[in-house]
Amino acid sequence: MSEHAFTFAGYKGAKSVHAAAVDKFGARLVEELGQQVSFEQMSDALAQGHKSGDLPGMVANGSLDFCYIATLRFADKVPQCQLFDLPFIAEDRSNLFSRLDGALGDYFRAEIERETPHKVLGFWDNGLRHITNRVRALETPADCEGLVIRTQISETIGDVFRSLGFTAEPMDIKLYRERLDDPDIHAQDNDLPTILNFGIHKHHPHVTLTGHILGVLVVICSKAAYAAWSQEVRQAVDTAMADATEFQRAVAASRDAEASAQLAADGALVAALSDEGRARFRHAVTPVLERHRSLFSDPVFKGLV
């Protein structure tokens, strides 16, 4: 029997780049530690009856060893995590993740580890988010008026969509997946691979390439558990996570074009915003950015907000 039986949970499903990265992490961990460790992935915790928001608590109480989770889940403890909920500020993947590998990442790692029982192991690419809906093409914010949109559970994100004219309905992704065919929920936003893998386009034929938010995931374990592991295990975890993170980001950046083509082949009406339309979307959300600007006075945020 292995000394360490590790379980890593996610919620994007077995076809996701996240699941592939978790597999890579596990394989490298076994390569480093051999028979000391066994590794299991729960690629779709939602199908096991868990909400995505349950996972950090399960890591903290030892039910899980690792998980990935959206940064917004830490915004109550670290308000600056709302940075990743603000629209049109981080459209350049390479720049954002380069900064997360430096001082910006050090800032969030220190804040999250001080305010929660979790240790931050890495930052993963959760994709550029786009809006889908079952009603009509979205060319300007005027087209959003009267539509109910499922949003992630974040007051900031709710503000963003209300500023565009939507009625925001926050909901865990588990509950939303169960209500995909609900005619009273007209719209949602997600990255293209998730839209494809969850089959959202079968209910929402209009896919508008807004690219309004570049999502960031935090990979976490328990601080107490990490401290209790031997130096050899800690080093193996860190090495495996570095490999998995490099892989995850590279593949995530390449998946958008593939997913867009497949969505169109499946009959989805995939449309980019015109320059004028994008300018109107940006203008509509400006008040939200202004209300949050004071959170980001630290020099580490320079050039982002």
Image (tube, rainbow, N blue to C red):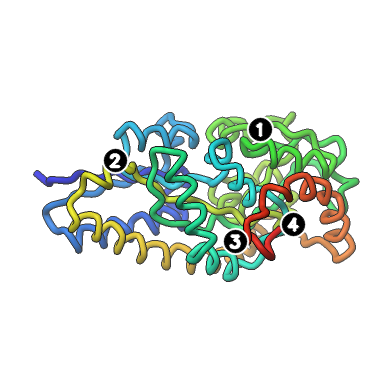
How far, Cα to Cα, is label 2 from label 3?
28 Å
Nearest to viewer (mark 2 / mark 3): 3
Viewer-side residue, 171 vs 239: 239
Residue 21 in the image, given as x and y percentages of width and height: 39, 58
Is 74 on the left-hand or right-hand side of 59? Answer: right
Nearest to viewer (mark 3 / mark 1): 3
Q: Disc 2 on helix, strand or loop? A: helix
Q: Disc 1 on helix, strand or loop? A: strand
Q: Is residue 212 above or below residue 133?
A: below
Q: Please report whichever mark, 4 or 2, sits nearer to the chain's N-terminal start.
A: 4
Q: Please report whichever mark, 3 or 1, sits nearer to the chain's N-terminal start.
A: 1
Q: Which residue is mark 3?
A: 300
Q: Please report whichever mark, 4 or 1, sits nearer to the chain's N-terminal start.
A: 1
Amino acid carrying label 1: it is Pro
Viewer-side residue, 214 vs 197: 214
Q: Which residue is mark 2?
A: 224
Residue 90 in the image, given as x and y percentages of width and height: 66, 61
Q: Which residue is mark 1?
A: 170
How far, Cα to Cα, is label 1 from label 2?
32 Å
At x 88%, y 56%, the residue is 280
In the rendered image, the quadrant that contains the C terminus is: bottom right
Amino acid carrying label 3: it is Val
Q: Please report whichever mark, 2 or 3, sits nearer to the chain's N-terminal start.
A: 2
Q: Is residue 267 above or below residue 163?
A: below
Q: Which residue is mark 4?
A: 210
Q: Please report whichever mark, 1 or 2, sits nearer to the chain's N-terminal start.
A: 1
